[in-house]
Image: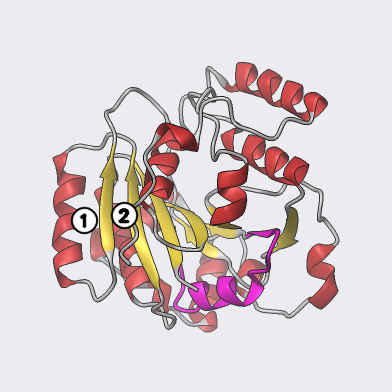
Amino acid sequence: MLISVIVTTYNRPDALRAVLAGLLAQVDRAFEILVADDGSRTDTRELVEATARASPLPLRHVWQEDKGFRAGAARNRAAAAAQGDYLIFLDGDCVPRPDWITRHRALAQRRWMVAGNRILLSEPFTRLVLASGTPIHQWTEAQWQAAAVRGDINRTRPLKTYSLGPLRKLGARRWQRVRTCNLGVWMRDFQAVNGFDEVFEGWGFEDSDLAVRLINHGTRRKEGAFATGVLHLWHRENDRHLEGANWERLQKRIAGREVLAASGLDRYPPAVTSP
């Protein structure tokens, strides 16, 4: 099963460099990387192209014009170009550890999405990591415990691994814990709901809307915590002036039990797969 990792980014090449380093250090190598760029400057393109030249994995840059926060559209464009059977969405400031793909693959199950979690790095620690190029994706549990004592991170529990078994399916219809900073979903299910709905512009709830429509379609949510946790670098909050309007739109979707995005994946031509 080929996995397509879709990394969303916007004008933060230092964080993206750390994320790509984590992806290139994965134990499982059966995946491709698509950087879904929401209109970054040329330094992001230069970083991706330089990394791609030295990468043992397929790495592509999918760019769209900067017209404000349009993460859903950026992800749709990248998903349309993807060749994998399974998609994992990852934010461009969330660093994966070496077993991240392995863990996601182990949890992948037809008609289920896998919602992962994260730990949060403090602002000073994030600045130190990015300035020094510290390979935090390779850190040991002892190093993270020490970071927690120093106050560099908010918690360590998401970095632990437990099997959980059937407990992972207890929240099968719960959309509230789904974030596309760390989400696995089958391409077939993503296509069935027409991807992200691009009527959600500006920050807020485009990922919740996707989760709601996937659940309405019959896809269920599997807990990815204690298996797929990522390292979330600090960032400033996005402009949230459209949050209220997006919340109201989400409530209408929930009430109407809608499945298809009004303006979604079908706006982009699908990838051409080699015979």
Quadrant housing the C terminus: bottom left
Q: Residue at position x 41%, y 76% from top?
A: 30
Q: Is residue 184 visible?
A: no
Taking the image as shown, residue 99 lies to the left or right of residue 10, namely: right
Q: From the viewer's perspective, is the residue at label 1 or at label 2 nearer?
A: 1
User: Is 245 left, or right, of 93 in this rendering?
Assistant: right
Callout 2 amino acid: Leu
Residues at marks 1 and 2 touching, judged by CB atoms closer than 8 Å: yes
Q: Residues within 10 Å of mark 1 (few under 14, many from 20)?
A: many
Residue 214, compared with residue 200, is above or below; it is below
Residue holding disc 2: 16
Q: How is the image coloured?
A: secondary structure
Placement of 167 over or under 60, stated as above or below: below
Q: Which residue in the structure is indicated by mark 1?
A: 48
Q: Secondary structure at mark 2?
A: helix
Give the class, few, some or many, for how many residues have Cα within 10 Å of label 2's Cα (few <14, many ≥20).
Answer: many
Give the residues drawn in magenta, as a range.
96-115
Q: CA distance from mark 1 to mark 2?
A: 9 Å
Front-lying residue, 227 or 184:
184
